[in-house]
Amino acid sequence: MFMKDNNSGNLVEILDLAALANPGSATVQGRFHAGEEMQDPSSFDKSNLCFPSGESLPACWTQANYPH
């Protein structure tokens, strides 16, 4: 799955989909898809990610107490 990094605007390949959907995890492993070479995996703050369309992540992925 690809998400967009809000800081750079580059696409990020998410390597751990379970962590992306886990509201208890503030970070997720992924790698930038920019340039010609495969980038090394990095940790990304979920608060800095959005869908490629610009839509933010669902609250149930980011808020541990959702919907309360």
Image (cartoon, rainbow, N blue to C red):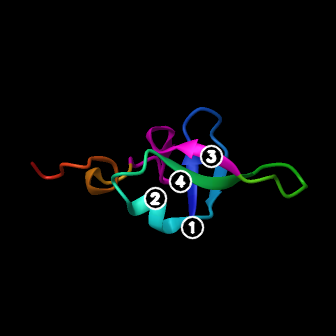
- Residue at horizontal 62 percent and vertical 46 percent from the top: 43
Q: Give the labeled residue for mark 1.
A: 1
Mark in the foreground, 1 or 2: 2
Q: Give the labeled residue for mark 3.
A: 43
Q: CA distance from mark 4 to mark 2?
A: 15 Å
The disc, 3 or 1, on the residue closer to the chain's N-terminal end is 1
Please, what is the three-letter code of the amino acid marked with disc 3?
A: Ser
Q: Is residue 14 above or below residue 32?
A: below
Mark in the foreground, 4 or 2: 2
Mark seen at residue 20: 2
Q: Give the labeled residue for mark 4.
A: 52
Please, what is the three-letter code of the amino acid marked with disc 2?
A: Leu
Q: Between residues 45 and 56, which one lies in front from this camera angle?
A: 45
Q: CA distance from mark 3 to mark 4?
A: 18 Å
Q: Position of residue 25 (x, y in %)?
A: 42, 51
Q: Between residues 6 and 21, which one lies in front from this camera angle?
A: 21
The magenta-colored residue range is 42-56
Please, what is the three-letter code of the amino acid marked with disc 4?
A: Pro
